[in-house]
Image: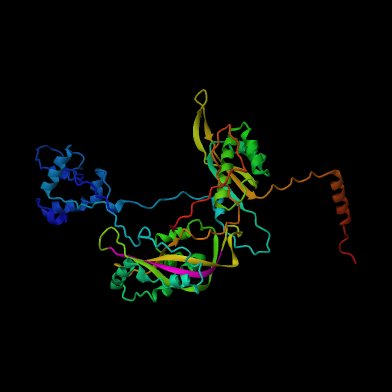
Amino acid sequence: LSASFPQSVEPLLSPTRLTRTSLVVPVRTKRRHFIPPAVSAKHLTPDEHKLKARAAGIVVPYEPPERPINLACTAGIFDPYVPPEGDARLSSLSKEGLKQRAEKLKQSAASQLAIPKVKEYDPDFSTKTFPEKAQEIFIEAHNCLTNFNKQKLHSLVTERCYPEMVRGNRYNTIRWSFVESLEPPRVVQIRCPTMVNKGNLYAQVTVRMHTRQTLAIYDRFGRLMYGGEQVPKDVLEYVVFERHLVNPYGSWRVHGKIVPAWAPPQDPIIKTVMVPGPVLDPSQEFDEIQYEIPKPKQTQWYK
Amino acid sequence: MAAQAVTGAGAAWARNLLSWARPERLLASCSISLLSNIQTRTYQQNVGRWEKKNRIVYPPQLPGEPRRPAEIFHCRRDIKYSKDKMWYLAKLIKGMSIDQALAQLEFNDKKGAKVIKEVLLEAQEMAVRNHNVEFKSNLHIADSFSGKGHYLKRIRYHGRGMFGIMEKVRCHYFVKLVEGPPPPPEAPQTGFDQAKEYVQQLRNRTIIHTL
């Protein structure tokens, strides 16, 4: 993260002051009180420059052109959580549903190992109380997004997540509201990755939230672009929260979301979009009936 | 730091050295930049008023309101062409749909036609990508005009040692695209309409200051 300049290229002095000798020549001229440096300049090689500077004892402080970069968040989600298939599909009364509900953190060993590491830096951390706080942060962040409160949003959302939330929305109006939470949120995974140095610990906690929300996005002219204001939707999300543990002023912030591969496709946007067609030879004709629009493969991705 | 290292003769000489031994000045001669001199701010040119019109955001419309048509403002600055010659082309395409305008400009022989065509294509692309316009052909040109750009002055040499000041002209071109079909052209006023107006004027006459 810091590039250092080669040591050989050092600042040099003009040698005029160093080589000025007081020559007393008996000539009837006006005594010059100030002789400009350029008059008696001698051209020396860089090595001779260095020697003269060292002889005169003039030292210029060496400032390597480094810029300190503060890493307040990690670049991605380390070891992303793979949600089990059909997580919220089964009703909690059936046997499979109960089994799923009984899936606790204890399954994942790495998460269990990470908990004491987190408690070392944040003694108030607990898997029982954290999900509620996390949900509050989540709701507050989305409210700031609707109100364009960028200052507060930066404190609730990491630097990696901020552009993803805000991109393309500069001239759009977003109306979002949180209706209710269908299931109590719970922690599903904890990881403690390190960045750059070994001691630089971050904690990433994935929280599973099953909630009902309404979303409506209006474009620059006030026309509805996506969603509906009176249409609440059930949403199952795996939100990752992060905190820079080593920093005493760090706080839990939204870092990203994990979208599982089996997630139902999102609603289409209201307007029609042109998709680039196949590349044809001049002799070929485009067969509209036979051609199928390619759909993207459903994989897990996190954003 | 320099004070510690000076071992030369004379405290006054050392103080003189200190006064001008500023690292920035020294390094400037050797073309190496200090950390403190690195400028990370980029200065933008002045954004014109026409470009700023693309930044206004309207409040969301209520469900009962008629759909507001999208308006896209685009311009190109300092085109090497005369504003008076550009005006003819701007007046030609004003009021046309964008497809018709592009067709007319493609087969026009003037130099400005090529430039305006590029500008229209850029604006169309911007509309679809950034301003939530659904169909790229569903745009018409509501407003198109040219303005004076920055002129340069040069000398034009005449005979007999006479000279004239030549102006290298440049112009700006502004266009406003609005979503929707182009408005129907105004029907020319017929004699019958004129007669109706005349009769109406006669009927509107009243006598003032009476009972």
Q: Quadrant of the C terminus of chain A?
A: bottom left
Q: Look at the image and say whether residue B123 sits in the magenta stretch.
A: no
Image location of residue A216, percent across then percent down: 57, 63
Relative to the observer, which residue lies in front, A105 or B75?
A105
Residue A214 within the magenta-colored segment of the rendering = yes
Front-most of residues B24 and B50: B50
Q: Residue furthest front?
A: A95
Question: Which residue extends farthest right?
Answer: B211
The segment highlighted magenta reads: A200-215
Q: Residue at x 36, y 52 (%)?
A: B40
Vertical position of residue A259 compared to residue B75: above or below: below
x%, y% of residue A157? 42, 65
Find residue A149 and report its horizontal and vertical position in percent.
47, 66
Residue B71 location (% of width, % of height): 61, 52
Residue at x-position 63% and y-position 62%: B61
Q: Is residue A85 left or right of residue B205?
A: left
Closer to us: A88 or A2: A88
How would you classify the magenta stretch by its main secondary structure?
strand
Q: Report the residue that reaches farthest toward the top.
A: B160
- The answer to whether B90 is drawn above or below residue A181 in the figure is above
Residue B145 at least partly seen = yes
Quadrant of residue A138 within the rendered picture = bottom left
